[in-house]
Image: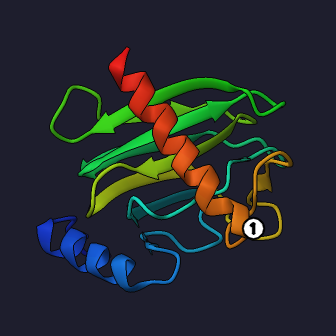
């Protein structure tokens, strides 16, 4: 019989600490195995981590994020790259999660050091088909990625002022 898996402050702190030391400034803690039909994971993301806008189209997959600690923002784009929506997730405020429809370009930003999200999406995980990166966005690790990340943070700042 499988034992309970505790999602507590100790796990979140350990994952956040390891994410801060990681070159990508983020780190997953998977609760699933690749062939599982539901993928469940913690995602520790630091504010300076760039996640290239992407969609899950082949097959079309919905995705859910809940903020467990810290804050973040989910940004949704049109196929052309135009901004469609921004939703701020904050563990101290009134919006804790989001469901992202299948086939929508999106990214998630951390808005606070030590932020951890619970992510759920349909499986099984296939790294060859998991994501389709937006053709209009710089890929992670490119010189343009940092400028794009800063622009995304500015968009969230502006959206919060409205």
- Residue 84 lies left or right of residue 108; in this view the side is right
Tell me what residue is drawn at x 25 percent, y 75 percent.
Answer: 3
Residue 56 lies, in percent from the top left, at 74, 47
Can you name the residue that lies furthest to the top here?
A: 162
Residue 102 lies, in percent from the top left, at 70, 35
Query: Quick check: 73 above or below 85?
Result: below
- Viewer-nearest residue: 92 or 80: 80
- Residue 115 lies left or right of residue 153; in this view the side is left
Query: Quick check: 98 above or below 138?
Result: above
Residue 101 lies, in percent from the top left, at 63, 30
- Viewer-nearest residue: 96 or 87: 87
Residue 138 lies, in percent from the top left, at 75, 57
Q: Describe the element under mark 1 as helix, strand or loop.
A: loop
Tell me what residue is drawn at x 40 percent, y 33 percent.
Answer: 157
Q: Residues within 10 Å of mark 1 (few under 14, many from 20)?
A: few
Protein image colouring: rainbow
Q: Which residue is mark 1?
A: 126
Residue 1 shows in this picture: no
Q: Which quarter of the picture shows residue 11?
A: bottom left
């Amino acid at each position: 019989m499988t034992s309970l898996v505790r999602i507590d402050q100790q796990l979140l702190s350990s994952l956040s600490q390891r994410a801060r030391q990681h070159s990508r400034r983020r780190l997953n803690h998977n609760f699933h195995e690749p062939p599982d039909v539901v993928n469940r994971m913690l995602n520790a993301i630091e504010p300076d981590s760039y996640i290239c806008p992407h969609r899950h189209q082949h097959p079309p997959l919905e995705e859910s994020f809940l903020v467990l600690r810290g804050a973040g923002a989910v940004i949704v784009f049109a196929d052309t790259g135009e901004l469609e929506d921004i939703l701020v997730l904050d563990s101290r405020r009134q919006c804790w999660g989001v469901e992202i429809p299948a086939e929508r370009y999106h990214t998630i930003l951390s808005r606070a050091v030590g932020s951890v999200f619970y992510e759920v999406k349909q499986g099984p995980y296939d790294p060859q088909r998991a994501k389709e990166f937006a053709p209009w966005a710089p890929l992670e690790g490119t010189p343009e990625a940092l400028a794009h990340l800063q622009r995304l943070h500015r968009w969230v700042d502006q959206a919060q002022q409205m």
